[in-house]
Amino acid sequence: MPKAMRLPDFPLSGLVPIEKPSGPTSMRTIDLIKPLLCESPLFHDPTLTSAAEKKAEVKRLMKHRGGLKIGQGGTLDPLADGVLVIGVGKGTKLLSQFLHCTKSYTTTALLGSCTTTYDSEGPILSTAPWQHVTREIIEQALDRFRGEIMQVPPIFSALKMDGKPLYEYARSNTPLPRPISARRANISLLQLESFTPASVVPGDGGHTFKPPYEQLSEEEREVYFRMSRLTREAGIVEKEFGADDDTNGKGKKGKNAEKGEPVVQHIDIPDLPNPSANAASTSADASTATTSTLVPPTFTIRMTVSSGTYVRSIVHDLALSIGSAAHVVTLTRTRQGRFALNNDPEGLGEIGTSIPETETATTTITTKQDTSDDSNDADAEWYVHDPEGPGRFDFGDRKTGCIPWSVFERAIAERNAARKAAAAAAAAEEENAEKEKVEKQKEEAIAASEGVTEQVDEEGQANAVAAAPAPTPAAARWQPKDWEKEFYARFVPC
């Protein structure tokens, strides 16, 4: 029988990894789960016992200022999913450590086209041949991206200089005032996981990904290629981690940058294929294909990288290096520091360093005021009920991996349904009360018109005996919801 252990003092403060879904931003993801946390006893002061006090506590926690402190330790783009480390309470002070840790990703890329954002969220910038690309060609090209490399983020959508997007310089054909800031990245693991052949129709063994429909106009393409030329002419300098992309001439650019000498003269990646030149080759390739509906292949790579690495840039540059183009269609962060997306038995001990290690977390929950030996009294205020005895509750095994987003989806749906039902019940109760009020007014009017008066006893009280007030039910004992169990099973207190 494992030894019982105590929960950390309420309200909880610490870290927990969740699985961010693809679609919402990282902050939107937090906004979606915040009401659950604010309404959970896990984050309430245990000395609050009355319903009014608890309601006021929830209202206070929901406030933007002075409410529940909650943050995340490394933003994921809306397209991306996977590990998102959440800090609650004092745990928010620990989130900075996840900005400087190694991270692992799995990404799938679609060959044949590149976009302004290097992923499927942006419009197509250019197309390129892909029929020559094989698994072997990609594997051979990976070698040049392993180890320490220099990276520049998507220059069309992400870079500014002196507060001005680079494409504004390109539109006016104005030379850049200084070199582009590149970031040094370390790729400790880069491995091809799969290569899916071109697809003709669904179910033919291919894939279902399709390139974006939106494309840049000829004028916008010309601006991009002009911007690419200006970037290369200006040169590239190393940017220290933490410096803004928009340095306004005051950012840190490495040791040699102070002398006006680029640390890296250029990144050895071919230019984007020229759209006009592409048209002829694409039509020629299409004539040899069995169908014009052929969708290019995809490839999936797994990587472990240093902080600040642009995963989309790796995919973009890799495709250019093999004479093609590609953009990211899926991106999953599988690990961030000590937190992994899936169950990791090796990580259990590391996570458990902040919590006494037991096979099961059979927890005694008490108030802060009452921690004496007789605190197992069934009438104690902050105990949860368990069939094995008062004051005991089995939270289950400690777990690694992230809380699946499906757990929060169910909890959010249940909360919304409960709120909707409560609102409907309140509306029905109000309607019934209004009806009763109207009926009573009618009865009183009839009685008054007939001259009927109510008989009164000697003490001036109504003859009708008032119904005795219903006994106050015992305070409902807290039964942790499924999401609360999953939360605590992975929670790391601080």
Image (cartoon, rainbow, N blue to C red):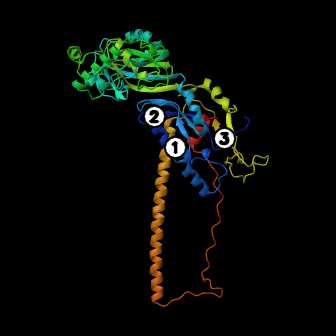
- Disc 3 to disc 1, how far (Cα)? 25 Å
* Label 3 secondary element: strand
Image quarter where the N terminus lies is top right
* Badge 3 amino acid: Asp
Q: Residue at x 61, y 25 (%)?
A: 347
In the displayed structure image, the side of residue 298 where residue 101 appears, left or right:
right
Q: Which of marks 1 and 2 is nearer the N terminus?
A: 2
* Label 1 secondary element: helix
Query: Is label 3 or label 2 in front?
Result: 2
Task: Give the residue at mark 2.
Answer: 21
Q: Quadrant of residue 93?
A: top right
Task: Give the residue at mark 1.
Answer: 34
Q: Are marks 3 and 2 in contact (CB under 8 Å)?
A: no
Residue 25 x %, y %: 43, 35
Q: Can residue 201 be seen in this view?
A: no
Task: Give the residue at mark 3.
Answer: 394
